[in-house]
Amino acid sequence: MENNKKFFIETYGCQMNFSDSEIVASILEEAGYYSTKEIREADMILINTCSIRDHAEQRVRKRLEYMQSLKKKKPGIVIGMLGCMAERLKTQLLEEEKVLDLIAGPDSYRDLPQLLAEVESGSKAVNTSLSVEETYADVSPLRYDSNGISAFISIMRGCGNYCAYCVVPYVRGQERSRNANSILTEAESLFNKGFREITLLGQNVNSYSWNEGANKVDFAKLLGKIAQLNPLFRIRFATSHPKDLSDELLQTIAIYPNICRSIHLPVQSGSNHILRHMNRGYTREHYLERITSIRRILPDCAISTDIIAGFCSESEEDYRDTLMLMEEVGFDYAFMFRYSERPDTLAANRYKDDVLTGVKDSRLSEIINLQQKLSFQSNKRDVGKTFEVLIEGFSKRSDDFYFGRTSQNKVVVFPLTKNNPGDYIQVKIDRFTSATLIGEAI
């Protein structure tokens, strides 16, 4: 079926959302729609949303004001909201945001053609049903906004951890793993199309588990199978949960050079009191023991993390425990946030958000300053070293320079060579900033 209508997808939030947008694009093109990169050309605009933090939702609300102005100029345009915010607020959004014609949750994307047909017949359309089975394993994502070098593969959906601050289990449903064979097929297809790096995505990739008869494929086995497809195919993954990070997984990474030496291991807090309050399932001591294992088995591995400042009941001592843990580990980089209460979570229902906003801001500022110092020190240690870099494209600042990333996920900028994006090249680092390594190809 062809209808010549064009869609534009605007994506907010994490890598999972970008992967979902590619699934949505594939489903729509299969139904006869066409993607466009020009929002003003679109007959429908779909906003793929995030609910992890209130700030993310407020950005979307602000964006809908712009959509309202577009609709005045082009009354027939369809505006839809997808993803976690759509799932969390459901029909409430249609009352609050009159510009919206369509609401679809993360497990409802197969129904988008039918929902759009409802809108075209003059009705508002909503489907926010969560599934215990949907993984979109048979959907080949449309890499409509890709650099042709790197791609995402979702290996699981949902989450079963129920961290006190997190809305994900309520908006993405229970954890379920995708068929291992479908993942391998997608990965091999991407390599054959010229992609040279994939990132395996899941809320907690360490708990990936697929049973096929008597054969069980856990995450370590899945990584090994993908790594064996081709040594020129780089593999990254996110996110790892500290309570499930096994030595077996670390040893698998050590065996295969094309599994990147970079682990994102969110700690959230360095205080045992706060970790219990967050329902994280590990202690400070266990987290540091996992760091010790990473350093022992993968001595060249970069470690990044997530940190929340000002969670419910966080005392000055709790906060100082986080700073001390940061210094002890020496994270290469981090994602740092001020705690914002999310409706319907365990924390919202049971705890008082009792850390003053000014205190949260002050603590976050100090955490950011410390991490900048740690990142600076990390990059300084790389000066004089030579890294294999996968060229991803031209530097944002100059077409006379390429940029790429090391196995440790650090951005490297270097003068143009005769090589092309998608090639691997050895680069010797001679200077740096807190965010970038700068060097020369050798």
Image: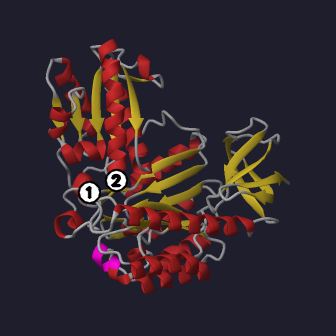
**Residue 351 placement (x, y as % from top left):** 21, 70
Q: Quadrant of the C terminus?
A: bottom right
In the figure, is residue 231 to the left or right of 293? Answer: right
Rendered view: 302 above or below 422: below
Q: Quadrant of residue 292?
A: bottom right
> Farthest right residue?
442
Q: Quadrant of residue 5?
A: top left
**Residue 174 placement (x, y as % from top left):** 24, 60
- The tag on residue 342 is 1
**Can residue 27 be seen by looking at this rendering?**
no
Q: Secondary structure at mark 2?
A: loop
The three-letter code of the residue at mark 2 reads Arg
Q: Secondary structure at mark 1?
A: loop
In the figure, is residue 406 to the left or right of 71? Answer: right
Residue occupying image coordinates x 25% and y 28%:
113
**Residue 133 placement (x, y as % from top left):** 23, 53
Residue 109 lies in the magenta stretch: no
**Residue 79 placement (x, y as % from top left):** 29, 26
Residues shaded magenta:
274-279
Residue indicated by mark 2? 53
Residue occupying image coordinates x 38% and y 33%:
25
How dense is the environment of label 2, judged by Cα within 10 Å: few (below 14), some, or many (20 and up)? some
Instruction: Examine the residues drawn in magenta and state their main secondary structure.
Output: helix
* Viewer-nearest residue: 48 or 388: 48
The three-letter code of the residue at mark 1 reads Arg
